[in-house]
Image (cartoon, rainbow, N blue to C red):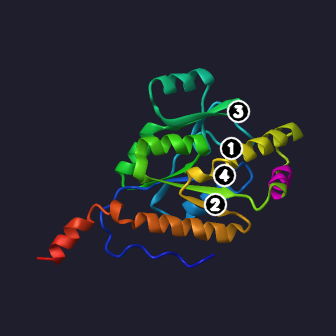
Amino acid sequence: MDAAIPPDPHSFRRRGVLFVLSSPSGAGKSTIARLLLAAEPELSLSISATTRAIRRGEEDGRDYHFVTLDRFREMAKAEEFLEWAHVFDQRYGTPRAPVEAMLAAGKDVLFDIDWQGAQQLHQIAGGDVVRVFILPPSMEELRRRLEGRATDAQEIIDRRMARADAEISHWDGYDYVLVNDDVDACFAHVRTILAAERLKRSRQTGLIGFIRKLRR
């Protein structure tokens, strides 16, 4: 792993970054998200709500908020989601209140969502959203990774591969596109992107006051 990225020594007040990671299933998005959360204490994960069944090893409230279809529909009707989408006959959505609480606490927020969610989030939050799309090195490698999980039937893997092709077609809706042929290198690139986006002038709300003091 690369050396830790030093913090901004001036610690200007800034707006939080809404940092989106998307990829086809099996391309490594979740692994990179875990590495990023472990390395970045100012970054918090937005936990999605889903109607799908809980899987072995998952925990409600840690991996997802597992809700019934009726409850999901109630939340959507009450506009409790920042974004939501249909994926493989199930629904996934980002609860609004926890994200707003994290931003109010000065945290950046990490989103593990698909292209539909990324698009909706960008429409709502615009310039505060940074979108990173992660590609597999090849479709053959993607299938190998999915089969290596040994968690899905072949029919499900075939559906994931078909969906992967559709997801990849939306690559040009992202700010950054990376190829994950080496997880450590890809993680280092993602972390560099986050550091650079935090330092953007447009996010440094305390910069104007600092410059005024310099010019007195």
- The CA distance from mark 1 to mark 2 is 18 Å
Can residue 152 be seen here? The reply is no
Residue under the point 55% across and 23% down: 73
Query: Which of the 4 quarters of the picture holds residue 207?
Result: bottom left
For this rendering, which residue is in front, 200 or 109? 200
Disc number for residue 58: 1
Secondary structure of residue under mark 2: helix
Query: In this view, which residue lies farthest toward the right?
Result: 154
Query: In this view, which residue lies farthest toward the left?
Result: 216
Q: Three-letter amino acid code at disc 2?
A: Ile
Q: Position of residue 99 (x, y in %)?
A: 44, 44
Mark toward the viewer: 3 or 1: 3
Q: How many marks?
A: 4
- The CA distance from mark 3 to mark 1 is 10 Å
Mark toward the viewer: 4 or 2: 4
Disc number for residue 32: 2
Mark toward the viewer: 3 or 2: 2
Residue under the point 39% across and 43% down: 100
Q: Say if mark 3 contacts mark 4, CB within 8 Å.
A: no
Q: Three-letter amino acid code at disc 3?
A: Ala
Q: Position of residue 176 (x, y in %)?
A: 56, 60
- The CA distance from mark 3 to mark 4 is 21 Å
Can residue 133 be seen here? The reply is yes
Name the residue that disc number 3 marks: 53
Secondary structure of residue under mark 4: loop
Q: Position of residue 93 (x, y in %)?
A: 56, 36
Q: Three-letter amino acid code at disc 1?
A: Glu
Name the residue that disc number 4 marks: 23
Mark toward the viewer: 3 or 4: 4
Q: Which residues are magenta?
A: 141-148
Mark 4 or 2, nearer chain start: 4
